[in-house]
Each structure stands twice: as structure tokens, then as C-alpha cells.
């Protein structure tokens, strides 16, 4: 039965991961564990940077932005499935659904742009270290951060405006665990050609432009590292960039698998898996990658742990 009047549709039903009752508790516990570890990991990064003056550098300023984005994206997407299990209510109003979709899409765009800014920061640190403090001033870092946040939210706005104007839906049930763009478009029986085109254009823009701006600095970084005579210098430069590069590759691979898969592989079940990895696993892994591969973070964490247990 088609829902042909937008005024009649006041809420959606979030299907979640599985309808099998035997899997509900394990899924809830897994999602809760991932969410709590994500909160603790990213909050630890934020705390360490705030309380350690030697970590208050441009690199860690952008890392704090990344941690805020990770906490926000996990919260905005995973809170509903946790709440649904506890309350038994898996409905979401149309306005709340559109708001969730807008915030999540904006946060993903923001993260791509923040990672681009971080690659520029690493380029200056490795290729022009003598001017690093002057080039990456607080003003420059603030401008790059603000631009990333503003552009991220502006890029997501057209999607929400178009989808909110859909007047026909095949069903009230969203086959997903949160309100994402693709499931809502597939659920609609309105003309989605403009939305599909906009997603393609924005996806192409976000998949190529930030990608190019992120990896071009690494061409110069790798060239500079290869020309270094000191093995210690090479190792230090490599470790300062490897964490960021790992996060970049992880995020882009996840987004490509989630939104740019071939049609033959584009199923809602696989979309759920990649969405869960993007909204839960990536924010969980980011602080682990930076803490395990960064000597400054590990040293600050050891000092803070020593002071609290002394």
C-alpha cells in the first residue's frame, strides 16, 4: 500500500538489524559495547589534549575535531537502536528522521574535510618544518576547522530539502538502523531522479576533490622522507603521518563500499553492514590508531595514568 499524502505520514518504523528475537540481546550488547568504547576512547583523546600543553599543537587540534565528529556520528546513529531495545518503541517521527539524516550526512562531510586539513598540516610539518609554527598558526587552524564544519553542513542541506519533499512512500518501514539517505530514497515512490543525480554529483565531489587534496600532500611528503639522510628522521616523519593516512584510507574505503558499490552488490543488508562499520567501527578505531601509533599520545596517557594511580 502506497502512502500518497505527506501529511498522513507522521512517523517511520526503523526495522533495525534483525527481526529474530534471539539476536536482539546480542546485537544490543555489541552495539552498546562499541558505543561505550568509542565514547571512552575519543573522550580520552580530548582530555589528554586539553590537559597536556605539549599536545596543544595544530595536529592535535584537528585530532580533537575528529574525536568530536566520531562521538557525534556514533551518538546520532546508534542511540535509536539502543533506545528502541530498552523502550520497545522503534518509531521515529518524520522530522526527527530528517534531522538525523541531515546531522549524520553533515558529520561525514565534515570528517572528510577535517582529514584534508590534517593532511595539509602533515605536509607543512614534514616538508617545511622551519615555518610550521608560522604557517599553521591558531588563526589558520581555526579557519580550516570552521570551513570544514560550515561546508559540511551546507553540502548536506540540499539532500534533506529534496527528500523532505517526497510525498509518496512504499512503506512506513525503513530497512535500516537509522535514517540514511539511500534507504529513504529507495523507500520513496516519488520521482527521485533529482535526488539520485544530486547524490551522484555530491558523491563524486566528495570522493574526488577532498581525496585529491588529501593525497597530493602525501606525494610531496613521501618524496621528502625518501630524501632524508637520517634514518631517525625518516622513522619519525613516517610515524607522524602513518596514523592519519591509516584513518583516511579506512574512511574512504568504507564510504566507497557503502555508497558507490556496483548495483549488483547494492543490497540493504550489505548497506547495513557497511553503515555499521562506518558509524561504529571507524569511530572506535580512530582513537586506537592514534594512541597506539603515536608516541606523544602514549606518553601523555602513561603520565596521566601514573598521576591518577599515584
Image: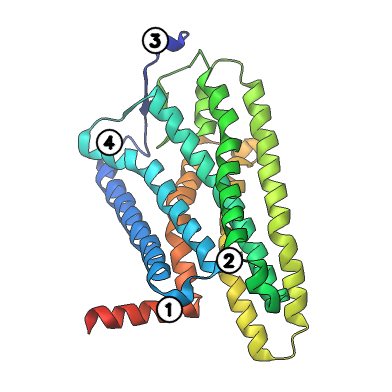
Q: Quadrant of the C terminus?
A: bottom left
Secondary structure type for disc 2: helix
Q: Mark 2 highlights which residue?
A: 244
Compare residues 35 and 303 and report the one nearer the observer. 303
Q: Give the distance between the C-alpha atoms of the residues marked 2 and 4, in whole angstroms.
A: 35 Å
Answer with mark 2 or mark 3, whichever residue precedes in sequence: 3
Q: Does the CB distance between marks 1 and 2 fall below 8 Å?
A: no
Q: Mark 1 highlights which residue?
A: 298
Answer with mark 1 or mark 2, whichever residue precedes in sequence: 2
Secondary structure type for disc 4: helix
Compare residues 65 and 242 and report the one nearer the observer. 65
Q: Give the distance between the C-alpha atoms of the residues marked 4 and 1, in whole angstroms.
A: 37 Å
Q: Mark 3 highlights which residue?
A: 8
Answer with mark 2 or mark 4, whichever residue precedes in sequence: 4
Please tell me which residue is depicted at 42% across the width and 51% down the height of the picture: 280
Please tell me which residue is depicted at 47% across the width and 61% down the height of the picture: 64
Please tell me which residue is depicted at 36% across the width and 61% down the height of the picture: 43
Secondary structure type for disc 1: helix
Compare residues 292 and 55 and report the one nearer the observer. 55
Q: Does the CB distance between marks 4 and 1 fall below 8 Å?
A: no
Please tell me which residue is depicted at 66% across the width and 37% down the height of the picture: 202
Answer with mark 3 or mark 1, whichever residue precedes in sequence: 3
Relative image position of residue 9 (x, y in whole percent): 40, 14
Q: Mark 4 highlights which residue?
A: 84
Amino acid at each position: 500500500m502506497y502512502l500518497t499524502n505527506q501529511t498522513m505520514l507522521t512517523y517511520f518504523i526503523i526495522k533495525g538489524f534483525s527481526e529474530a528475537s534471539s539476536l536482539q540481546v546480542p546485537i544490543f550488547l555489541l552495539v552498546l559495547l562499541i558505543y561505550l568504547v568509542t565514547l571512552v576512547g575519543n573522550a580520552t583523546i580530548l582530555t589528554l589534549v586539553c590537559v597536556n600543553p605539549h599536545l596543544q599543537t595544530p595536529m592535535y587540534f584537528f585530532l580533537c575535531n575528529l574525536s568530536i565528529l566520531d562521538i557525534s556520528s556514533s551518538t546520532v546513529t546508534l542511540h535509536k537502536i539502543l533506545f528502541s531495545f530498552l523502550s520497545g518503541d522503534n518509531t521515529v517521527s518524520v522530522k526527527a528522521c530528517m534531522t538525523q539524516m541531515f546531522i549524520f550526512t553533515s558529520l561525514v562531510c565534515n570528517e572528510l574535510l577535517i582529514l584534508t586539513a590534517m593532511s595539509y598540516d602533515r605536509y607543512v610539518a614534514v616538508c617545511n618544518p622551519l615555518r610550521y609554527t608560522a604557517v599553521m598558526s591558531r588563526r589558520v587552524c581555526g579557519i580550516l576547522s570552521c570551513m570544514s564544519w560550515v561546508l559540511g553542513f551546507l553540502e548536506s542541506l540540499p539532500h534533506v530539502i529534496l527528500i523532505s519533499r517526497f510525498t509518496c512512500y512504499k512503506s512506513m518501514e525503513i530497512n535500516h538502523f537509522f535514517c540514511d539517505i539511500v534507504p529513504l530514497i529507495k523507500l520513496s515512490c516519488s520521482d527521485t531522479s533529482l535526488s539520485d543525480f544530486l547524490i551522484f554529483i555530491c558523491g563524486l565531489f566528495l570522493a574526488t576533490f577532498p581525496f585529491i587534496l588529501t593525497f597530493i600532500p602525501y606525494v610531496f611528503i613521501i618524496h621528502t622522507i625518501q630524501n632524508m639522510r637520517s634514518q631517525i628522521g625518516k622513522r619519525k616523519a613516517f610515524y607522524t603521518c602513518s596514523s592519519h593516512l591509516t584513518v583516511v584510507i579506512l574512511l574512504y574505503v568504507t564510504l566507497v563500499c557503502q555508497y558507490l558499490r556496483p548495483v549488483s552488490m547494492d543490497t540493504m543488508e550489505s548497506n547495513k553492514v557497511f553503515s555499521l562499520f562506518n558509524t561504529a567501527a571507524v569511530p572506535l578505531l580512530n582513537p586506537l590508531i592514534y594512541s597506539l601509533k603515536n608516541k606523544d599520545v602514549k606518553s601523555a596517557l602513561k603520565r596521566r595514568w601514573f598521576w591518577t594511580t599515584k
